[in-house]
Amino acid sequence: MADLGDARPLRILGAEVLELEAVLAGDGKGRQPHALAIASEVLANDTRTHRGLVKALDDGGMEVVVWGESWPTPPEHRIEPVVHRLSVAAQAFKAQALAAAGVPVVPGDVEVFRSGLSAFPPVGADLSPVG
């Protein structure tokens, strides 16, 4: 298993990696991301990240994506399964990131997440409601 402090797999995917403590200490000040992606395990085990996610959902204006199943959907928010279809290029980047993380590569061109997409997602959104 990869070192949890190794950000290389996420950088391969083009993600900017920030220290959680610095983000939480910023109290919403500074740059605003366009998207927030977080593992449900983190939400279930850290009340600060849970509060931050609920705040992001309340504020709107940012795509929120959760993967994993251990976090219950807050009743006041509409978090639904969504599908992301990977291009051939995205599959190649994902394979490289998984290899860098020491995680076995499972071939496939579809990923399922849960998202706080609005009823009318922005034009060009890469997530589609499951169904």
Image (tube, rainbow, N blue to C red):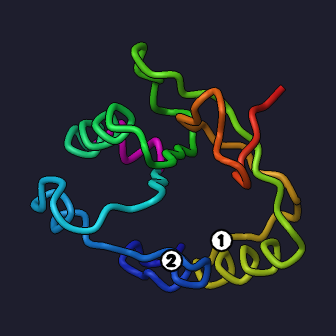
Picture quarter with the N terminus: bottom right
Q: Are marks 2 and 1 in contact (CB under 8 Å)?
A: yes
Q: Is residue 107 above or below residue 47?
A: below
Q: Is residue 106 above or below residue 131?
A: below
Mark 2 and mark 1: Cα distance apart in space: 8 Å
Q: Please report the residue visible at 88 percent of the width from the left and 64 percent of the height from the top.
A: 107
Q: Is residue 50 above or below residue 13?
A: above
Q: Position of residue 13 (x, y in %)?
A: 61, 77
Q: In the displayed structure, does residue 53 sit left or right of residue 41?
A: left
Picture quarter with the C terminus: top right
Residue 2 is tagged as: 2
Amino acid type, residue under disc 1 in the picture: Val
Query: Secondary structure beneath disc 2?
Result: loop
Mark 2 residue crowding within 10 angstroms, few (<14) / some (14–19) / many (20+): few
Residue occupied by mark 1: 103
Q: What is the magenta segment's predominant secondary structure?
A: helix
Q: Is residue 73 magenta?
A: no
Of residues 80 and 20, the one nearer the viewer is: 80
Query: Secondary structure beneath disc 1?
Result: loop
Amino acid type, residue under disc 2 in the picture: Ala
Q: Please report the residue visible at 10 percent of the width from the left and 60 percent of the height from the top.
A: 25
The magenta span reads 39-45
Q: Please report the residue visible at 18 percent of the width from the left and 54 percent of the height from the top.
A: 28
Mark 1 residue crowding within 10 angstroms, few (<14) / some (14–19) / many (20+): few
Q: Which residue lies most toward the front here?
A: 123
